[in-house]
Image: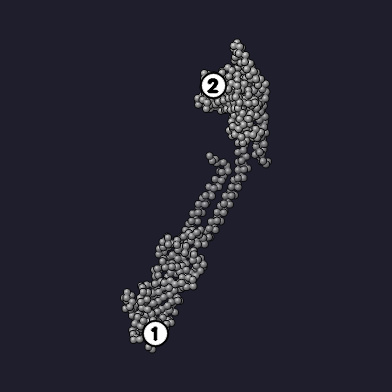
């Protein structure tokens, strides 16, 4: 669970103070960005509308020329000429020249490059500024439609659009062009619009172009056509309206797009510019602000860390040291640094703990002496009873003149008491301890012929050192409380097994066993102060194993697969023991030595 210490509290205060500043700045930034977007949208809309009106004005002016020419006297006279042959007379030639002069004057009245042509169905000729030639009436009839017509042609590797419009006199002859008296055609190409787009582009940030679905695109001459095509693809998916202000993302870049529809031509005037170009001052301001906030946080963190390391950490170290001292850890020491007040307190604390530890070590040694004395006292209490039973067996066998049983009992008994009376070492090899248990079981087997046993031990485990007289109490407990109370055949099995970095000596029996509750109660009693009614044997074994090997060693009990009780003597292996005895990579069953005694019981080989 997360805890607020001094350091986290200071950091929390700094962060809480900066949060309102960040919120206000973000709100102000969003408001500023919104206002700027609205102003940009309105400004771009006004510019596009003004430009669109200029283009429309030019187009409308051009579209008004045919109506002016229809009412011209020379054009009216041209309508009334009917020739019997295809050659014009002098009056006709002079009339055509006057019409061509007027057409040239009309075209020069606009700064757009335009073309005017007058068709005379009566003569079958078309008159333009520079020529008067015959035309095909059928092809002309197919070309005549109402309003502006757009055709596309390829010039200099690029698409060029030709805008043309036909005006007929009388107007009702639009349905049947053959009945028209005069047909006037006005046209211009898209280069005129490109000129205006180039001028409108101005500062280079704009990228205007004209677009009409299913017709094409009129780019300015320096346009990025690839990017414009991608933009058109996006706009076609989104759908365009008469006036649009959109933000379109292409790749990693966002673009601000404005579009205005021309009611005259039906083309969209579209302009776009990178959003980053417009927002770069705001982005720069944001970066500067965030860098300032990050710097403030860094300075705050450093200041908080200095306070934490110079004040809070020494206090916490003292508190933890006192807690460990309270829990009985007298090896705790502080590492004083510097010459400030906390270093002085640390040195005084270390001095105090050293004195306390010396005192407790003296008391601890005395307690160990008391425990050893109690252990020897227990052994002296247990051995006489066992000794009397053995001599009672010898007496009975002597009366029955069973000399072999007497000799065997005396031999095993001598081996048994030789081990117990000459045991002055703190640790003995596991093989010696198991051999001692073997003599004990042979003695019990003579008293109870229905008892059989087996001892299986890996050769690597035989040289491991353990405290003396820790296995025999487990076997004795199995014999007295598991096998002896029942009349059936009794089996005791002793084996070693390595589990991870631990060595286990397992004693199984098929005796009466214990219930789950009784096993739990027995296990818990091992870690409590000994009670008179519970006995000292198993408790002494458990405490001595923990004394020699640490808190992870000791006794465990569980139900045996044989039906009785399983007692497990467990202790950790040191790295030196694993290397010396070849236990690092060996399995629990490697190099097992298993022999069978003359009576059928399995014993360990020496």
Q: Secondary structure at mark 1?
A: helix
Please provide percent x and percent y for residue 443: 60, 19
Left or right placement of residue 584 versus residue 519 in this view: right
Residue 398 in sight: yes
Q: Secondary structure at mark 2?
A: strand
Residue 495 to residue 147: above or below: above
In the image, 354 versus 493, the foreground residue is 493
- Give the residue displayed 45% in from the left and 63% down from the top: 232
Whole-angstrom CA distance, mark 2 to mark 1, is: 142 Å
Please provide percent x and percent y for residue 488: 52, 20
Say if mark 2 contacts mark 1, CB within 8 Å.
no
How many badges with numbers are in the image? 2
For mark 1, what is the residue?
Answer: 96
Q: Residues within 10 Å of mark 2 (few under 14, many from 20)?
A: many
Please provide percent x and percent y for residue 158: 48, 70
Res. 211 image quadrant: bottom left
Residue 549 to residue 397: above or below: below
In front: label 2 or label 1? 2
Res. 425 image quadrant: top right
For mark 2, what is the residue?
Answer: 490
**Which of disc 1 and disc 2 is earlier in sequence?**
1
- Give the residue displayed 61% in from the left and 34% down from the top: 586
């Amino acid at each position: 669970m997360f805890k607020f210490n001094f350091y986290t509290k200071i950091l929390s205060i700094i962060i809480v103070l900066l949060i309102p500043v960040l919120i206000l700045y973000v709100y102000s930034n969003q408001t500023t960005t919104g206002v700027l977007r609205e102003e940009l949208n309105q400004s771009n809309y006004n510019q596009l509308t003004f430009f669109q009106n200029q283009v429309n004005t030019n187009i409308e002016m051009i579209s008004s020329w045919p109506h002016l020419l229809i009412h011209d006297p020379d054009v009216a006279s041209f309508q009334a000429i009917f020739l019997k042959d295809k050659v014009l007379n002098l009056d006709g030639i002079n009339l055509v020249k006057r019409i061509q002069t007027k057409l040239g004057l009309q075209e020069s009245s606009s700064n757009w490059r335009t073309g005017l042509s007058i068709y005379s169905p009566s003569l079958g000729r078309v008159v333009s500024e520079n020529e008067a030639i015959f035309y095909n009436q059928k092809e002309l009839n197919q070309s005549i439609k109402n309003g502006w017509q757009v055709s596309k042609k390829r010039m200099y590797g690029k698409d060029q659009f030709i805008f043309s419009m036909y005006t007929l006199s009388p107007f009702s002859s639009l349905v049947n062009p053959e009945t028209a008296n005069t047909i006037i055609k006005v046209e211009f190409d898209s280069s005129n619009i490109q000129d205006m787009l180039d001028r409108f582009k101005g500062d280079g940030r704009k990228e205007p172009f004209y677009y009409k679905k299913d017709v094409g695109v009129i780019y300015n001459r320096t346009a990025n056509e690839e990017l414009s095509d991608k933009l058109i693809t996006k706009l076609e998916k989104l759908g365009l309206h008469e006036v649009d202000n959109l933000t379109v993302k292409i790749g990693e870049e966002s673009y601000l797009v404005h579009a205005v529809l021309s009611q005259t031509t039906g083309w969209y005037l579209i302009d776009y510019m990178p959003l980053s170009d417009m927002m770069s001052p705001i982005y720069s301001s944001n970066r500067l602000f965030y860098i300032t906030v990050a710097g403030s946080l860094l300075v705050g963190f450093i200041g908080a860390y200095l306070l934490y390391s110079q004040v809070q950490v020494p206090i916490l170290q003292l508190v933890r040291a006192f807690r460990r001292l309270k829990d009985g850890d007298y090896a705790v020491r502080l590492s004083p640094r510097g010459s400030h007040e906390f270093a002085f307190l640390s040195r005084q604390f270390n001095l105090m703990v050293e004195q306390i530890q010396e005192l407790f070590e003296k008391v601890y040694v005395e307690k160990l002496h008391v425990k050893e004395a109690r252990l020897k006292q227990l052994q002296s209490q247990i051995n006489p009873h066992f000794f009397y039973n053995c001599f009672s067996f010898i007496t009975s066998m002597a009366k029955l003149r069973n000399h072999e049983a007497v000799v065997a009992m005396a031999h095993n008994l001598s081996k048994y008491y030789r081990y117990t009376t000459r045991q002055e070492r703190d640790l003995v090899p596991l093989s010696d301890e198991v051999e001692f248990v073997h003599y004990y079981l042979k003695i019990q087997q003579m008293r109870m012929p229905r008892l059989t046993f087996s001892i299986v031990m890996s050769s690597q485990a035989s040289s491991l050192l353990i405290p003396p007289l820790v296995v025999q109490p487990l076997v004795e407990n199995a014999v007295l409380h598991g096998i002896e109370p029942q009349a059936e055949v009794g089996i005791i099995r002793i084996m070693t097994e390595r589990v991870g970095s631990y060595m286990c000596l397992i004693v199984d029996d098929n005796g009466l066993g214990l219930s789950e509750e009784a096993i739990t109660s027995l296990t818990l009693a091992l870690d409590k102060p000994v009670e008179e009614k519970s006995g000292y044997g198993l408790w002494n074994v458990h405490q001595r194993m923990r004394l020699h090997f640490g808190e992870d060693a000791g006794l465990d009990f569980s139900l045996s697969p044989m039906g009785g009780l399983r007692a497990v003597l467990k202790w950790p292996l040191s790295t030196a023991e694993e290397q010396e005895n070849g236990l690092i990579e060996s399995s629990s069953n490697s190099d097992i030595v298993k022999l069978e005694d003359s009576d059928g019981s399995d014993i360990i080989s020496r």
